[in-house]
Amino acid sequence: MIGWGENDRGVSFTFGEDIVAQFLRKMDLDLVCRAHQVVEDGYEFFARRQLVTIFSAPNYCGEFDNAGGMMAVDETLMCSFQILKPAEKAKRQALSGGTPATGARGGPATPPATRKAPSPGRGS
């Protein structure tokens, strides 16, 4: 893609490598770091490594199998990344108390309601 475009949902814009390069040149920067977009491996480069997207939430909303990522920048401006691996589906369900059955959104299903026994001394 070259230039600007509308995203698929029509609520924001997309941009090409040329826009990243123009921005960096105008602002005298080397790298754009951005977040708030799910990326599979926790971080992802774009535009010849001039832009990096970082997403720190592994298994986002329990609906994705993405890793999370954290970026550290040292005193020489060297960037390094730590990856938070996604939990396996079976392990996530066990930790959340879920069952292998899933609800409408793909998460653990709500367990069926149980009937309470009548309290002693009340009713018949």
Image (cartoon, rainbow, N blue to C red):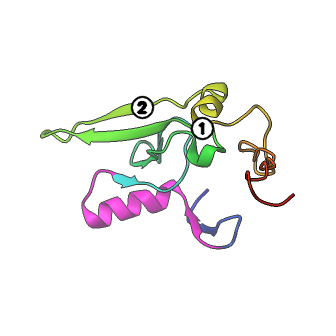
- Which residue corresponds to the image point at 74% horizontal and 55% vertical from the top-left? 121
Read off the magenta span: 11-31
In the displayed structure, 106 sits above or below 9; it is above
Q: At x 78% / y 48%, what residue is drawn?
A: 117
Numbered-mark total:
2
Quadrant hosting residue 48: top left
* Residue matched to label 2: 83
Task: Tell me the crowding category of disc 1: few under 14, some 14 to 19, or many 20 or more residues within 10 angstroms, Cα based.
Answer: few
Q: What residue is at 43 percent from the left and 44 percent from the top? A: 56
Q: Classify the position of the N terminus by image quarter.
A: bottom right
Q: Which residue is mark 1?
A: 96
Horizontal placement of 26 versus 59: left or right? left
Q: Position of residue 20 (x, y in %)?
A: 43, 58
Q: Which amino acid type is marked by label 1?
A: Ser
Q: Residue furthest right?
A: 124
Which quadrant would residue 91 be assigned to in this image?
top right
* Residue 33 as seen in the image, left or right of residue 74: right
Camera-nearest residue between 46 and 17: 46
Query: To which quarter of the image does residue 108 belong?
Result: top right
